[in-house]
Amino acid sequence: MNAPTTFSSPGIVISGSGVWTPTNIITNEELVASYNAYAEKFNSDHKAAIESGEMEEKPLSSARFIEKASGIKSRYVYTKEGILDINRMRPKFPERKEGEISNQAEIAVKAAHNAMAAAGKTAADIDVVIVSCAYTQRSYPAIAIEVQNALGIEGFGFDMLVACSAATFGLHRAYDCLASGSAKCVLSINPELVTPQVNYCDRDSHFIFGDVSTAIIMERAETCTSANSYEVLSTKALTKFSNSIRSNFGYMSRATDVDPYGWDKLFHQAGRKVFEEVSPIAAAHIANQLASLDIKPADVQRYWLHQANIHMNKMVIKQLLGKNVPAEATPTIIDRYANTASAGLIIAFHLHNDDLKKGDIGVICSFGAGYSVGSLVLQKR
Ligand code: CO8
């Protein structure tokens, strides 16, 4: 690329990022050993029904398949307790009292502290808190307001749910608040505590997810003191309804008299269909956004993409650039973290941006449930 181009924008920057990673790890081998023990017990307990065709046999899982099909080798989880217990197959969290901080606010605060330190901000500098993620552990009061209180921030906070695109859509809202003047510094957090919604009895999805929390500070350029910051050149969002990734969990179960923990109330998807339908949408979305800025896809130094499947990211890049690019241009963290819903691309950004030079261009892009695609084009300052 030639000398860095200067773009006209309202002067809004990302000035810090932070990640909180749980200490507990579950490898594919551990997960598969537990699932297979569960499946074998299930098949033995229901032998007669399976033989008569009333029930379907549970197929066995394979660590080799998981790594080959997705790129995932292990995942971090908030708690390991219960997940590998074949008589439970779901995590076990002690219920917290109303006076205690919620699990989700707790991990949001941890990531927030890291992002605030990176941006050189204190609570007094921030006036908006956005908690944007795939699930919130209660309806109200908003987790964001609990986080705001725990950090001692004046102003306002709100929660947003946009599944895989929650982090990027949260940053879009942060950008809009700053551009309109309704905020001077926004803390956008993604406490992705997703393991309670994983169906560990389902071979097709038991391996996909892990827990994490990420945070970003976005502010106006004139207040930024960070030595590592990015101008936001553009934000772009797209949604298109699809039932191919779905969870029917919600407050209506009590009134509809259905099992609130039935399989359809947990994460489920038609993975191959999603892969094939979403990749071209994401590639076209990024191409259009870059074209609107007169930037060629090949002139982008880094693509921080949604971390759901390593092959999917390769396909998006191939469709965008017509060729593969070196691994360092599209950082992958899915091998260690698995899919962390919306937070994966913020982890990738956080861990792999220090080496970029002034003027370098980067793209953050999410794609998945909704369907939803959210992206930001950034330029290193
Ligand atoms: N072990 C062995 N075999 C398996 C396993 C397993 N664990 N799982 C499936 N198989 C089998 C299948 O049953 C199938 O068998 P058959 O051919 O006999 O029917 C065979 O392997 C091939 O299956 P697929 O075609 O489904 O395999 P793929 O190569 O497509 O890989 C993936 C499956 C990895 C799921 C892949 O399709 C994928 O990653 N797709 C992308 C999906 C995606 O991006 N989804 C977005 C996820 S949603 C999100 O990111 C946020 C949502 C909100 C958070 C929710 C938190 C709980």
Image (cartoon, helix red, strand yellow):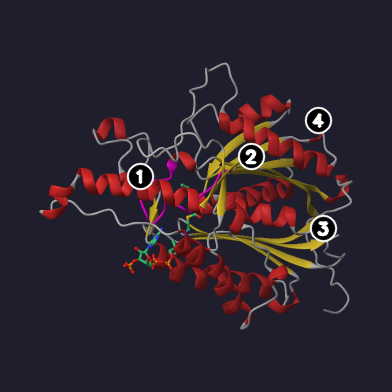
Q: Quadrant of residue 236?
A: bottom right
Identified at 14% across, 48% down, the residue is 49
Q: Which residue is mark 2?
A: 23
Image depth: mark 4 or mark 3 in front: 3
The residue carrying mark 4 is 124
Please tell me which of labels 4 and 2 falls first in the chain.
Answer: 2
Mark 4 vs mark 3, CA separation in Å? 27 Å
The residue stretch that appears in magenta: 197-211
The three-letter amino acid code for the residue at tag 4 is: Ala
* Residue placed furthest toward the bottom: 322
Closest to the camera, between mark 2 and mark 1, is: 2
Q: Is residue 260 left or right of residue 136?
A: left
Nearer the camera: disc 4 or disc 2: 2
The reply to whether the residue tagged 2 has its Cβ within 8 angstroms of ligand 1 is no
Q: Quadrant of the C terminus?
A: bottom right
- Marked residue nearer the N-terminal end (2 or 1): 2
What number is the disc on residue 248?
1
